[in-house]
Image: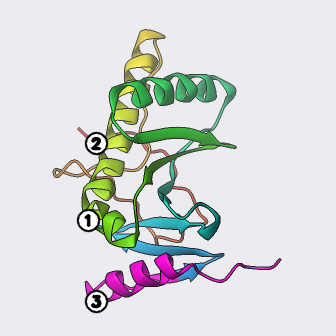
Amino acid sequence: MIVPEPSASLLKIHEHLSNEGFRPSFHEGEISFKFQGRVFFISHDDSDAEFFRLLYPHFWTIESQEEKQAALAAASETCKTLKVAKAFLVEDEVWASVELFCSDADAFLAVLERSTSLLYETANVFRHHYNSLSHEHGDEETGGPESDDDGHDHEEGSGDPTSAPKKEEPHH
C-alpha cells in the first residue's frame, strides 16, 4: 500500500498540534492525535485544497441487526439536529466527522477546537437518539463508551484507533 505524502496543509496542522502540546502522528496519510483521551484524525487532500475532514472514528459498536437499524435512525436524527457534523455507519461501528471548506490550514486551525468539541457533542446526541429509539421499542438502554460528569466520552484501554469500545450498561 502506497501512503501519500502529507500535504503542506497537513504538515502545518501537525506542527501546530505539536506546538500546542499534542503528540500528533501521521497515520496512512492523515494526522492522528488524542484530545481528552480520544483519538481523532485529520485528513486533507491537495487535489481539493479547501476541503478538510476531522474524524472521530468508532465511537459506538453495533452488535446486531436490530442495533444497526436503530443506529441508522439515530445517525439520521443526529445529522438533522447538529450543524456541520455527520454521524454515519462504517461496517459495525458508528463514526462522526466534521467536514469543512476552509481557505487554508490557518482557517481550519481557527475552528479546530470548536470542531473537536462538536464531535464529542455528536457522540452524545447520537447516544441520546439511540437510547430514545431503544426505549420506544422496549429495549433496555444501552451505551457506547462511558460518559463521565463532564459529558464527554472516555473509553478504557490504550486509545488504539483500530479498536472500538465495547458497549457497557450505564452506571446510575
How many numbered marks have been drawn onto this rendered protein structure? Answer: 3
Instruction: Give the magenta range.
Output: 1-25
Give how far across and how far down residue 52 sits, in percent.
48, 60
Q: Residues within 10 Å of mark 1 (few under 14, many from 20)?
A: few
Residue pushed farthest left? Answer: 149
**Between residues 76 and 151, which one lies in front from this camera angle?**
76
Could you say which disc has been placed on residue 19 in the image? Answer: 3
Residue behind mark 1 = 110
Q: Residue at x 30, y 48 (%)?
A: 118
Question: Toward which corner of the image does residue 72 lie, by quadrant?
Answer: top right
Query: Going by the image, does 140 lie left or right of 36?
Result: right
Q: Is residue 163 visible?
A: yes
Q: Residues within 10 Å of mark 2 (few under 14, many from 20)?
A: few
Give how far across and how far down residue 79 sits, in percent.
43, 30
Determine the CA span between mark 3 and mark 1.
15 Å
**Between residues 115 and 126, which one lies in front from this camera angle?**
115
Of labels 2 and 1, earlier in sequence is 1
Does the magenta portion include 14? yes
Amino acid type of the residue that numbered disc 3 sits on in the rendered structure: Asn
Amino acid type of the residue that numbered disc 1 sits on in the rendered structure: Ala
Q: Residue at x 70, y 78 (%)?
A: 4
Determine the CA span between mark 3 and mark 2.
38 Å
